[in-house]
Image (tube, rainbow, N blue to C red):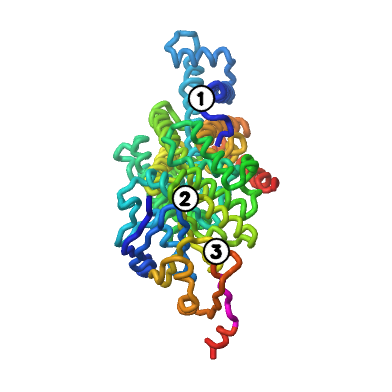
C-alpha cells in the first residue's frame, strides 16, 4: 500500500505551483514535507488526495492512477486533515468524528455497530474518549486538531495526509500531536513548518522549493546545513540532539553577514 | 446527528411523524375555520368531507366554496410554500456555510420574481398559465444564482462574501422587475404585480397545488438523499471532498433543486422573506444539526409557520388581508434577533 506521485505539475492563475515533482511515501512511515512559505506544500498535499486535479503527471495509490478512482472509494483509503478547519455549526466532538464514517455509509443507511465501533476507537486513539459529548466550540486548539485526526481515523484510511497539523499550537500540544501521529502506525504524509520537529518525528523528509523537489531522504540526508542555508537563507549549526535525531540551531550572525 | 444507539429507533420515528402530522392537521384545521366569514366547525368539516370524499352533506354552495376551494387550497399552499422555502434555506446555509443564507437574502427570490413578472407582463397574450410563469421564474432564479456565484467567486469566494453578492443580486433583479413593471405594464397590471411581489396567497386555487406539491415533495426527497453529504460540508468544501462527497455534483443538484423550489413558490405566491432564514435555525434548536433530522423538521415547521402566518395575515387587521411577506418579516426579524442572541450566550 503506497501513495506516490510521478512528474506532477499543477498551477493556478497562470502560475506554476507544483513543477514536476516525483515522490513516494513508504508504507507505515511518516513522510515530512518541508519548505519555505509558498513552496507548494499545501498544494502538493491537495494533489495527493485529489482535492485538486493534476495538470500533468500522475498520482498513484497502489500503482493505480487516482484520477480514475471514485471519490468515495478514495476517501476510504486516504484521509486528509486540514490546518485549522473550523465550523460555525453546533456540533459535539462525536458528531465531528462521525463525519469520518461518511464514505463508508450509503445515502440512506442508518448508523451501524461498525460505525459506532470505529468512532469510539478513533476517539480513544487520540485520547478524547471522555470528551465524546462535549461541544466542538469548547475545545482548545490542540483538542480540535485531535478531533480532526480522530475524524480522519474513523475513515479507516491506510494513508493519512496532514497539512501543518501543529500550526498555532503551543509547544506542548505540538509535541503531543506529533507523538500521536508517529504512533498511529499508518502511512502519514504531513507538511511541517518547524525543521527540528520534522527531524524529530519524520522517518523521511521531502524538501520543496518553488514547486520543485529539492531533496528527499532521511532527515540526516536532507537537513544539512548547506541545504538549509541554500533554501531557507539562514545559517545553521547542526549537532546531534538528545532525542538521537539531529538538532538544528539557527545562527543569528548569518542575517548580518547576508546583509553586508 | 443522533446520539441514539445504532440502528433506526422506529417507535420514536413513528411517534415524531405522528405528532408532526397532528400538528399540521391542526394548523390546517385552524386555517380552514378562521376567517372573515364565520362558519361553524361542523359545517366546515362537512364541507371538507364533501370536497375530499365526494360526500353529499347539505352545505350551502357559498360555504362549500369558501371552505374547500378558498381556505383549504390556500392553507395547503401556504404549508407547501413554507416547507419548501425552509428546506431551501437549510440547503443554502449548509452548502455556503453561512447561517444567513436563504433564497430571499441571496436574491434568488428576486430573480424568480423578475422572471415571473417578465412572463406575466410580456407573455400575457401567449396564455400566461401558472406553468409558464413558473418556467419564467425558474429561468430568473437560475440567472440570479449564476450572478450570485459569479460575484461571490469574483470577490474571493469566502463564505461571508456570498451575502454581499446576494445583496447586489437582489438590487439588480429588483431594479429589473421595477423597470419591466414601470415601462411595460398598465397601471392595473402594475398594482397587481406589486401586491403579488410582497407575497399573497389570495389567488391560490387547486391547480396551483398540482404544481407546488410535487415540486416540494420531490425536492424534499432529493435533499434527503444528500443529507449525509450536507453534514460533510460542516468543515468546508475540501473537507467534504476528502470525506468522499462528489462536491461539484452535489452542489449542482442541490442548487438546482433550491432554484426550482424557490421559483415555483415565488411564481405562485410571490416573494416571502425570512422563512428560509429562521425556520432552519429554529429547527436546529429542536433536533440538532444533522441533516437527516434537520431537513424533515424544516419541512414540517416551515409548513406550520407559514399556515399560521397566513391566518394572521387574514385576521390581524379586520376587513383587510396583509401581504404574507409583511407578516413573516414582522415575526421573523425579532425571532431571528432572539436566535442570534441565544446562540452567542452559551460558551
- Other residues around mark 3 within 10 Å, as few (<14) / some (14–19) / many (≥20): some
Separation (CA) of disc 1 from disc 3: 74 Å
Q: From the top left corner, tell me how far across and down residue A170 is, in percent.
A: 64, 61
Q: Are marks 2 and 1 on the same chain?
A: no
Vertical position of residue B146 compared to residue B232: above or below: below
Q: Which mark is residue A186?
A: 2
Q: Residues within 10 Å of mark 2 (few under 14, many from 20)?
A: some
Residue B50 at least partly seen: yes
Please report the bounds of the magenta region as a residue range: A247-252
Q: Mark 1 or mark 3, which is nearer to you?
A: 3
Camera-side mark, 2 or 1: 2
Q: In whole angstroms, how far apart are the C-alphas of marks 3 and 2?
A: 18 Å
Magenta stretch, overall SS? strand
| Residue at disc 1, secondary structure | helix
Q: Quadrant of residue A120?
A: top right
Q: Earlier in the sequence, mark 3 or mark 2?
A: 2
* Residue B313 visible somewhere in the drawing: no
Residue ID for mark 3 = A200
- Residue B44 colored in magenta in the image: no
Name the residue nearer the viewer: A164 or B306: A164
Amino acid at each position: 500500500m503506497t501513495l506516490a506521485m510521478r512528474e506532477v505539475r499543477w498551477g493556478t492563475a497562470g502560475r506554476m505551483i507544483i513543477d514536476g515533482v516525483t515522490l513516494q511515501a513508504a508504507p507505515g512511515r511518516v513522510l515530512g514535507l518541508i519548505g519555505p512559505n509558498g513552496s507548494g506544500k499545501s498544494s502538493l498535499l491537495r494533489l495527493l488526495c485529489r482535492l485538486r486535479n493534476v495538470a500533468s503527471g500522475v498520482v498513484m495509490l497502489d500503482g493505480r492512477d487516482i484520477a480514475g478512482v471514485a471519490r468515495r472509494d478514495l476517501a476510504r483509503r486516504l484521509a486528509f486533515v486540514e490546518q485549522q478547519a473550523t465550523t460555525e455549526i453546533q456540533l459535539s466532538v462525536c458528531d465531528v468524528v462521525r463525519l469520518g464514517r461518511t464514505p463508508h455509509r450509503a445515502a440512506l443507511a442508518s448508523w451501524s455497530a461498525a460505525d459506532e465501533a470505529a468512532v469510539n476507537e478513533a476517539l480513544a486513539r487520540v485520547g478524547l474518549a471522555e470528551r465524546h459529548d462535549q461541544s466542538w466550540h469548547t475545545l482548545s486548539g490542540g483538542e480540535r486538531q485531535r478531533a480532526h485526526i480522530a475524524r480522519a481515523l474513523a475513515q479507516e484510511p491506510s494513508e493519512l495526509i496532514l497539512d501543518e497539523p501543529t500550526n498555532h499550537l503551543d509547544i506542548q500540544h505540538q509535541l503531543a500531536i506529533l507523538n500521536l501521529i508517529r504512533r498511529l502506525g499508518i502511512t502519514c504524509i504531513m507538511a511541517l513548518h518547524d525543521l527540528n520537529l520534522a527531524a524529530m518525528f519524520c522517518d523521511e523528509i521531502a524538501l520543496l522549493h518553488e514547486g520543485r523537489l529539492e531533496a528527499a531522504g532521511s532527515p540526516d540526508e536532507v537537513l544539512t546545513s548547506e541545504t538549509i542555508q541554500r533554501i531557507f537563507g539562514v545559517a545553521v549549526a547542526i549537532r546531534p540532539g538528545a532525542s538521537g535525531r539531529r538538532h538544528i540551531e539557527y545562527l543569528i550572525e548569518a542575517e548580518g553577514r547576508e546583509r553586508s | 446527528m443522533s446520539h441514539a444507539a445504532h440502528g433506526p429507533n422506529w417507535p420514536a420515528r413513528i411517534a415524531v411523524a405522528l405528532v408532526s402530522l397532528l400538528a399540521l392537521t391542526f394548523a390546517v384545521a385552524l386555517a380552514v375555520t378562521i376567517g372573515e366569514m364565520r362558519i361553524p366547525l361542523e359545517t366546515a368539516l362537512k364541507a371538507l368531507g364533501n370536497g375530499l370524499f365526494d360526500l353529499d352533506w347539505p352545505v350551502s354552495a357559498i360555504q362549500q366554496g369558501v371552505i374547500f376551494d378558498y381556505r383549504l387550497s390556500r392553507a395547503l399552499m401556504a404549508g407547501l410554500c413554507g416547507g419548501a422555502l425552509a428546506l431551501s434555506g437549510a440547503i443554502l446555509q449548509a452548502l455556503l456555510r453561512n447561517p444567513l443564507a436563504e433564497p430571499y437574502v441571496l436574491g434568488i427570490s428576486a430573480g424568480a420574481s423578475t422572471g415571473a413578472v417578465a412572463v406575466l407582463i410580456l407573455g400575457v397574450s401567449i396564455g400566461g398559465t401558472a406553468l409558464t410563469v413558473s418556467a419564467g421564474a425558474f429561468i430568473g432564479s437560475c440567472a440570479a444564482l449564476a450572478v450570485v456565484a459569479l460575484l461571490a467567486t469574483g470577490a474571493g469566494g469566502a463564505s461571508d462574501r456570498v451575502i454581499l453578492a446576494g445583496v447586489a443580486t437582489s438590487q439588480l433583479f429588483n431594479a429589473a422587475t421595477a423597470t419591466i413593471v414601470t415601462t411595460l405594464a398598465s397601471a392595473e397590471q402594475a398594482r397587481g404585480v406589486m401586491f403579488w411581489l410582497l407575497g399573497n396567497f389570495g389567488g391560490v386555487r387547486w391547480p396551483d397545488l398540482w404544481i407546488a406539491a410535487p415540486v416540494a415533495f420531490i425536492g424534499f426527497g432529493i435533499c434527503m438523499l444528500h443529507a449525509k453529504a450536507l453534514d460533510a460540508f460542516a468543515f468546508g468544501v475540501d473537507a467534504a471532498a476528502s470525506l468522499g462527497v462528489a462536491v461539484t455534483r452535489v452542489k449542482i443538484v442541490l442548487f438546482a433543486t433550491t432554484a426550482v423550489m424557490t421559483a415555483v413558490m415565488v411564481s405562485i405566491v410571490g416573494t416571502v422573506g425570512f422563512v428560509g432564514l429562521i425556520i432552519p435555525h429554529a429547527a436546529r434548536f429542536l433536533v440538532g444539526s444533522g441533516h437527516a433530522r434537520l431537513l424533515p423538521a424544516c419541512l414540517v415547521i416551515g409548513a406550520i409557520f407559514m399556515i399560521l402566518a397566513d391566518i394572521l395575515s387574514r385576521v390581524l387587521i379586520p376587513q383587510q388581508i396583509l401581504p404574507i411577506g409583511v407578516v413573516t418579516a414582522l415575526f421573523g426579524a425579532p425571532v431571528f434577533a432572539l436566535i442570534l442572541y441565544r446562540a452567542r450566550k452559551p460558551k
